[in-house]
Amino acid sequence: MPQQDRSNVNPSESGGFGSKLGFVLSAAGSAVGLGNIWRFPYLVAKYGGGLFLLIYIILALTFGFALLITEIAIGRRTGKSVIGAYKSINKRFSFLGWLAAFVPVIITPYYCVIGGWVLKYLATFISGNGEISAGDGSFFSEFIGSSAQPTVFFVIFLAITALVVMLGVEKGIERISKFMMPLLVVLTIGIAIYTLTLKGAGEGLKYYLLPNFDNFTFSTLLKTIAAAMGQLFYSMSIAMGIMVTYGSYMRKQDSLERSVRQIEIFDTGIAVLAGLIIVPAVFVFSGGNAEALNKGPGLMFITLPNVFQSMAGGQIFGTAFFVLVALAALTSSISLMETVVSIIMEKFHVKRIKASIITLIICFLLGMLSVFGYSAWKTVELFGMQFLDFFDFISNNIMMPIVALLTCALIGWVTKPVYIEDEVLESEEKFRSRKLHAVMLRYVCPVCMIIILITPFVTEI
Ligand code: PFF
């Protein structure tokens, strides 16, 4: 079995995680991000509350588990960056490594732009001016519509991300995750408890937890499943090389199956709690009107400041909330950037610092397209979308399902699931979910992936 081989990129620089806890917290840090706190709650709201929640949890425990353990095991078994990893499994699948590698190159820049927006809100709340962000949304549109401020906050967020990546896996990523993730859990639970004590929160809780079958049709079910699956990719950082990269830094003696279950519970738990914060809070604010939740992406940047404004102690609550979001976004952007850096180190034989600087420059240039897309170049559209939305669309709706589909083809049918099972058995007596993993990878996941890819067309018809 190939041992971790990072020699070609200078092992002292690439290193690895020093402990199982460090690995789990770092991978959970990657998974828990804007996807959990910003995207998950508005999807739950959009797709009928409890029904989406139920479908999501079932998918996370089956489909999400299979893909997550596959990627981490590929990384640990090959000990390579995502490009090297797929190539060493099967030369004919080298292109898949490149395709997967391209995803974080697209996502990191725009993710850091949104991270910058979060920092702006955090700065506004910390300085005691939270109320100016409330209102009809003009604060948000004026902010993203000006080029200068979003650039400043984007650059700050990007620079912090790059700094941690430059420090390396153990000294940078692991150390910061061990500190930030427990803080994130405490903050999430604390804020959720506070929300539930608000008068009128019960109605929101009901909406959130109980499935809503009004207007239920086959087409809505299909759309709900496709949306839940798409969210799984997003939330678990699957199909973009991240988990392969982190897996390559994982110690051989640590249990893979248990680690993956822990990451999954962490990620889903924080998403569910974030919904528990946001849905009831918005219900209280809107006097029980579920419509207020249907603001899509604007939920966090427009609706929530109004919610904070309307509650006692909203300034403190808002500050705590945006600290939470900033922490979550930061540990995720670190993992996105680390994936790109690991590729540059391996492919071009350059050291970590140099690879990080190259990545920083690429991210800055691409990120500026997203910044300008909402301001100076507002009129420029790509297939009817602004730059940020376009990057989000091609990475999440097209590239990630294709990468996942081809990974299933490679591991499910070419190497066979035994490739993963052998790696799991390196650190365990038994692979408890062996059958589930094989069935998911060979049959269920490919079908799901095809559903994701064709749903937009079918539902249009
Ligand atoms: N999983 C993280 C999140 O939920 O925010 C990070 C992330 C990675 C988000 C990749 C989106 C994405 F496409």
Image (cartoon, rainbow, N blue to C red):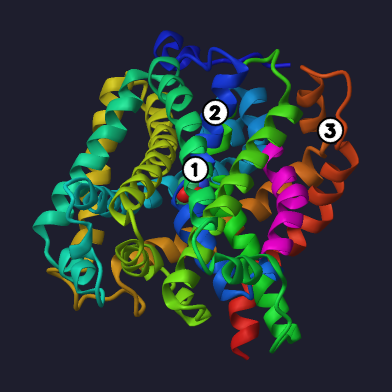
Residue 277's spot in the image, x, y percent?
51, 56
Q: Is residue 69 visible?
A: yes
Label 3 or label 1, whichever comes before in sequence order: 1
Q: Disc 3 vs disc 1: Cβ atoms closer than 8 Å? A: no
Say what amino acid the circle numbered 1 marks. Gly
Q: Mark 3 or mark 1, which is nearer to you?
A: 1
Residue 132's spot in the image, x, y percent?
18, 64
Q: Mark 2 or mark 1, which is nearer to you?
A: 1
Q: Which residue is mark 3?
A: 418
Residue at coordinates 58% horizontally, 34% vertically from top-left?
A: 244
Q: Magenta includes 38?
A: no
Q: Magenta includes 56?
A: yes
Q: Main secondary structure of the magenta part?
A: helix
Q: Disc 2 vs disc 1: Cβ atoms closer than 8 Å? A: no
Q: What distance separates the C-alpha of mark 2 from that of mark 3?
A: 27 Å
Element type at marker 1? Answer: helix
Image: 118 above or below 14: below
Q: Which residue is mark 2?
A: 25
* Magenta range: 53-70
Q: Nearer the viewer, residue 10 or 303?
A: 303
Image: 400 above or below 214: above
Label 2 or label 3, whichever comes before in sequence order: 2
Q: Disc 2 vs disc 3: Cβ atoms closer than 8 Å? A: no
Specify whether 47 is left or right of 102.
Answer: right
Residue at coordinates 59% horizontally, 61% vertically from top-left?
A: 230
Say what amino acid the circle numbered 3 marks. Val
Q: How many marks?
A: 3
Q: Quadrant of residue 377?
A: bottom left
At label 3, counting other C-alpha atoms closer than 10 Å, the crowd grade (few under 14, some 14-19, many 20 or more) is few
Element type at marker 3? Answer: helix
